[in-house]
Amino acid sequence: MGGLSIWHWLIVLAVGLLLFGGRGKVSDLMGDFAKGIKSFKKGLADDDPATAKSDAPMKSIDHQAAAEAAQRAEADSKVERSMS
């Protein structure tokens, strides 16, 4: 039970041939894998804001105006609850 006989190796070879087929299947799989990695890296590079170039100036958030809007919304909800 320690070693594999010739029949075991023939079965493993047959299963390997069934899975990967004959000529060129493994190289096709690896080529597709490489294309996927390249497109993934390209997608990461496109999403990077440091490399993205834009003519429009960067917009900032006015935190004070946002806080005032939140206070107004809270006050409006209190008024609505008191009228109900």
Image (cartoon, rainbow, N blue to C red):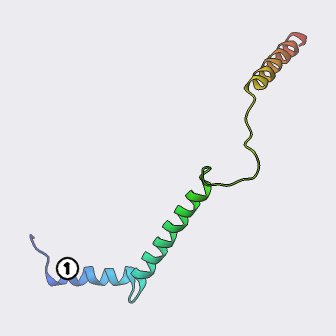
Residue 56 is situated, as x and y percent measured from the top left of the image, at 77, 49
Q: Amino acid at mark 1?
A: His
Q: Nearer the viewer, residue 8 or 49?
A: 49
Residue 42 is situated, as x and y percent measured from the top left of the image, at 56, 63
What's the residue at 81%, 23% (across, down)? Answer: 69
Q: Nearer the viewer, residue 35 or 61?
A: 61
Q: Secondary structure at mark 1?
A: helix
In the displayed structure, does residue 52 sit left or right of residue 10? right
Residue 51 is situated, as x and y percent measured from the top left of the image, at 60, 54
Quarter containing the C terminus: top right
Residue closest to the far top = 82
Q: Which picture quadrant has residue 53? A: bottom right
78 in relation to 65, above or below? above
What's the residue at 46%, 77% (across, down)? Answer: 31
Residue closest to the far right = 83
Q: Nearer the viewer, residue 13 or 51?
A: 51
44 in relation to 61, above or below? below
42 in relation to 84, above or below? below
What's the residue at 42%, 83% (across, down)? Answer: 25
In the displayed structure, does residue 40 sit left or right of residue 19? right
36 in relation to 6, above or below? above
In the displayed structure, does residue 71 sit left or right of residue 50? right
Residue for badge 1: 8
What's the residue at 38%, 79% (across, down)? Answer: 19
In the displayed structure, does residue 58 sit left or right of residue 33? right
- Within 10 Å of the Cα at label 1, are there few (<14), some (14-19), or many (20+) other Cα atoms? few
Quarter containing the N terminus: bottom left
Q: Nearer the viewer, residue 6 or 64?
A: 64
Q: Which picture quadrant has residue 39? A: bottom right
Residue 47 is situated, as x and y percent measured from the top left of the image, at 61, 54
